[in-house]
Image: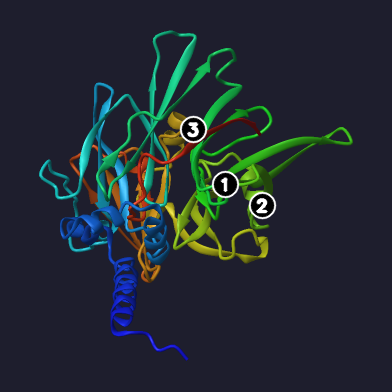
Amino acid sequence: MNIPSQPEVAALLVILHAKLIVEILTFLDVKSLIRMKCVCKSWKTLFSDPLFVKMHLKRQSTRMTHLALFSKMSQGSVDCRAVPISRLLDTTSNSITLTDDDPYYQFNFKNARCMVGSCNGLVCLQGCSSDSAAYIDHSFSFWNPATRNISETLMSFRQYDNSDPREYICRFLFGYDNSTDTYKVVSFGLKIEDSLMTSSGVYFNNSINWFARHRYNCHLITIEQFVIISVELGTETYTQLLLPRCCEEELRDPPILPPTLSMLNDCLCFSYDFKKTYFIIWQMKEFGVEESWVEFVKISYLNFQMDYSPRVLVQYGYVPELIVNPLCVSGNGDMVIFAINRLDQVIHYNRRDNRVKRIKSPNQIWWFDAKGYVESLVSTSRKYVLFDNLFV
């Protein structure tokens, strides 16, 4: 039996000590790691290493901790901001004000169109411009609010206006393909006469998902089916997930609110209008298992203090001005935050006592477009792919 010498033992202890330090560092939050970059050059290099970034992301909670949002729209540009969800869940205040000296990072984004989505701490931003009536240029850049890094425009997509806009819509979604370690922006065309898609889709479990209505002919009879389309980003194939059985009949009547998909408490959620009286959220507790749908929230519009009288419905009808969008939920699931219409306010809904509280803001915030994200060290100069020509 060979007994290691003292120098060999010392070298082994140094290696073990270094591995232990790295292990401990993966459990720290992003802001702490950023502050610790100045400790030594090796740590600064370590925090940018792809293997460490993956380890750190894996050790962090998948629960959304912040919202990325637009505010102060003026002359084609907006401010991009990051706000802690805990700030929204604070029930002691009736307002939230975002100032220029706010400690959370902000920057100006020109030609802003929307936030396409959020994944692994990255937020995909879409810009939109045109020098001709014949086409629209969609541009995409990527923002990590935690590290305060913003990429240049890394990809673009030109949409030619060769069709009636009432018959064709181009949408984008953002997600991560873990089989190739690639982030993908998915472009797909929607033919409105065949299917209907909500304005929002979500990334979850290596797939992008959206709500659709399919119409098909069967023995000279037109049949409608409401489903969730789920595209697996690794194989670029799709499956259809059925909605809760009780939703089918209600969705056949023209709703006053568009159905939406969202992520709440790490669950895929489907929201819809019930008989112009209630707003209902269903959670899919086990992704892909249609039997796992459970009703999560059922709240009357009277509680929302929203005016859905015949006069208002005649005025607006089925249009985006009438929006109820679930943004986030507290850790214990008791408090749900909603964006209501296109107003500068959100609503606290307490599921325990069925009470509602309005939170206003003077900042002209696009709450309906906000995206939840987790903080990470993922670089904004990663490998990205524009996956297009997907038609549903």
> From where the camera sits, is residue 262 visible?
yes
Q: Nearer the viewer, residue 359 or 184?
A: 184
Q: Which mark is residue 291?
A: none
**Amino acid type of the residue tagged 2 in the rendering:** Leu
- Label 1: few (<14), some or many (≥20) within 10 Å? many
**Amino acid type of the residue tagged 1 in the rendering:** Asn
- Label 3: few (<14), some or many (≥20) within 10 Å? some
Q: Where does residue 347 sit, x and y in percent of width and height?
A: 32, 53
Q: Tell me the CA gap for discs 1 and 2.
A: 9 Å
Q: Nearer the viewer, residue 225 or 246?
A: 225
> Is residue 235 left or right of 149 when viewed as pictured?
right
Q: Tell me the CA gap for discs 3 and 1.
A: 26 Å
Dot 3 falls on a residue whose secondary structure is loop
> From where the camera sits, is residue 306 visible?
no
Q: Quadrant of residue 374?
A: bottom left
Q: Nearer the viewer, residue 5 or 390?
A: 5
Which residue corresponds to the image point at 33% horizontal and 72% vertical from the top-left?
A: 15
Which residue corresponds to the image point at 69% horizontal and 31% vertical from the top-left?
A: 194
Q: Which mark is residue 241?
A: 2
Dot 2 falls on a residue whose secondary structure is strand
Q: Earlier in the sequence, mark 3 or mark 2?
A: 2
Q: Disc 3 designates what residue?
A: 317
Question: Where 87 sits versus 25, above or below?
Answer: above
Question: Where 186 sits versus 11, above or below?
Answer: above
Eye-nearest disc, 3 or 1: 1
Q: Where does residue 196 sit, x and y in percent of width and height?
A: 61, 35
Q: Where does residue 358 sit, x and y in percent of width and height?
A: 27, 53
Q: Disc 1 designates what residue?
A: 209
Q: Quadrant of residue 129?
A: top left
Residue contact between numbered discs 1 and 2, judged by CB atoms under 8 Å = yes
* Residue furthest left in the image: 101
